[in-house]
């Protein structure tokens, strides 16, 4: 990737233009972090860039951006620019192309994102971003209030960078966030979700949640979220207790869906409330459904074992019943979240055996059985909801090894249940 970026830069330089790698690439390169993409800033106009390269996509001509495709990968190449007013507090009304790298860097949000690197690897850092990285400081380029007034989303980006890079937000920037939080009402919920997701999926999500609580930014979203405790109404100990629960649960070691489910569960949101919050944040149906199913499986286990049993057989059956009901993926997510269950009297047994029980499970639902609803239909005069219930029960029995997954054995067990349920 880096070699392709340099090829693009050398082509631009060879044609008489300036070209630099900018933004996140430089920041992450200095921190020896993995690089996902490389953006290039240049004195060439979009028309010049499209003339010089055979494979381009006009991804943002109004803002000076052309995507150059090299070795099957896209590189955003943007003309040096200055920006007009941000009347919508999100995007500039217009941009003007300039020939100064420093002027282009001066419009960026934070000093750590306002660095450039030339084709030989030399860093251009007019605003002290490298020093701020070394000192662990997150500081705006220029006046923080002006930067946030230009684009209200930058306040959430500030929290995300502070959490993910473990930086201390500079006092002027923090004061500006507390003062200008209402500007978040101008930002589309999709953009809010993207920033929250990057924070939740980052290396220190609990710190991100603490900063969100302290800033109270989510009070001001365009669509009210009603998400307690992320929108604290006072300085109660409830928020600290929530954050402590997240730390104890080991949030940073979980997959992203498990992290979201844990946030809702420890925050006391029932599935209906969590569903409403995710819909407002424009979660995909797939992600939303997965999170809700993991929450439901977690709730199922707690409800079924609410008596506080230490009966290993009952704990095993409850766990495998839930795993079969909600599916393999949800079961894996609950395993990730199991530290939320440490106060339960049956936790020690569950923690010791749950993963092994899951690995031993070779029947994950009625579809894995050696019989079908048609076979059950031969045992009764009429069909009904009982057939689905019976197939599920047989799947749990077979999964636990209580009955062989063989047609004759399953039919014999089915007859026993039907007699027990008064169906024969």
Image: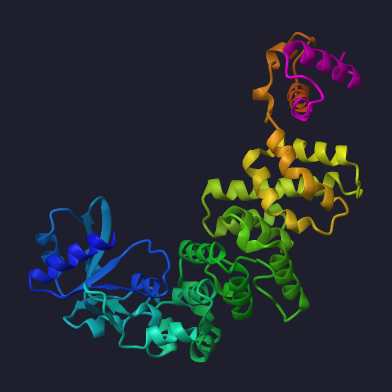
The residue range painted magenta reads 396-424
Q: Considering the whole magenta stretch, tell me its main secondary structure.
A: helix
- Observer-nearest residue: 221 or 319? 319
Residue at image x 38%, y 83%? Answer: 130
Residue 334 inside the magenta-drawn segment: no
Residue at image x 89%, y 16%? Answer: 419
- Colour scheme used in the picture? rainbow
Is 319 on the left-hand or right-hand side of 79?
right
In this rendering, is residue 144 above or below 338? below
Quadrant of the drawing holding the C terminus: top right
Q: Position of residue 70 (x, y in %)?
A: 22, 55
Q: Position of residue 339 (x, y in %)?
A: 74, 57
Residue at image x 84%, y 42%? Answer: 315
- Observer-nearest residue: 362 or 111? 362
Is 214 on the left-hand or right-hand side of 172?
right
Quadrant of the drawing holding the N terminus: bottom left
In this rendering, is residue 398 above or below 160? above
Is 15 on the left-hand or right-hand side of 286?
left
In the figure, residue 316 lies in which quadrant? Answer: top right
In this rendering, is residue 26 above or below 140? above
């Amino acid at each position: 990737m880096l070699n392709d970026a340099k090829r693009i830069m050398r082509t631009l330089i060879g044609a008489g233009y300036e070209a630099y790698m900018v933004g996140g690439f430089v920041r992450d390169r200095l921190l020896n972090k993995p690089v996902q993409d490389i953006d290039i800033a240049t004195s060439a106009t979009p028309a010049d860039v499209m003339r010089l390269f055979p494979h381009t996509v006009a991804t943002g001509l109004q803002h000076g951006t052309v995507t150059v495709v090299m070795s099957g990968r896209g590189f955003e190449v943007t003309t040096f620019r200055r920006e007009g007013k941000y009347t919508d507090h999100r995007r500039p009304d217009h941009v003007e192309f300039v020939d100064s790298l420093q002027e282009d860097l001066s419009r960026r949000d934070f000093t750590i994102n306002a660095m450039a690197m030339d084709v030989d690897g030399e860093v251009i850092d007019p605003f002290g971003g490298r020093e701020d990285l070394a000192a662990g400081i997150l500081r705006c380029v220029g006046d923080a209030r002006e930067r946030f007034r230009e684009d209200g989303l930058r306040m959430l980006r500030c929290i995300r960078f502070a959490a993910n890079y473990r930086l201390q937000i500079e006092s002027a920037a923090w004061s500006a966030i507390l003062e200008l939080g209402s500007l978040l009402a101008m930002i589309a919920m999709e953009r809010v979700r993207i920033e929250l997701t990057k924070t939740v999926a980052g290396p220190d999500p609990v710190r991100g949640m603490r900063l969100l609580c302290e800033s109270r930014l989510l009070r001001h979203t365009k669509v009210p979220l009603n998400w307690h405790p992320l929108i604290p109404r006072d300085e109660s100990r409830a928020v600290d207790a929530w954050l402590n629960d997240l730390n104890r649960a080991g949030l940073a070691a979980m997959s992203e869906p498990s992290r979201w489910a844990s946030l809702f569960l420890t925050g006391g949101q029932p599935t209906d409330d969590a569903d409403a919050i995710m819909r407002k944040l424009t979660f995909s149906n797939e992600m939303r459904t997965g999170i809700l199913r993991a929450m439901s499986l977690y709730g199922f286990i707690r409800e079924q074992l609410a008596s506080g049993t230490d009966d290993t057989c009952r704990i095993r059956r409850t766990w495998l019943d839930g795993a079969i009901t909600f599916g393999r993926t949800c079961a894996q997510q609950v395993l990730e979240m199991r530290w939320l269950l440490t106060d339960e009297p049956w936790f020690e047994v569950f923690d010791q055996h749950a993963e092994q029980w899951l690995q031993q499970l070779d029947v994950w639902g009625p579809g894995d059985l050696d019989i079908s609803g048609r076979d059950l239909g031969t045992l009764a005069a009429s069909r009904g909801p009982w057939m689905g219930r019976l197939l599920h029960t047989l799947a749990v029995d077979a999964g636990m090894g209580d009955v062989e997954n063989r047609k004759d054995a399953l039919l014999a067990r089915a007859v026993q249940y039907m007699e027990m349920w008064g169906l024969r």
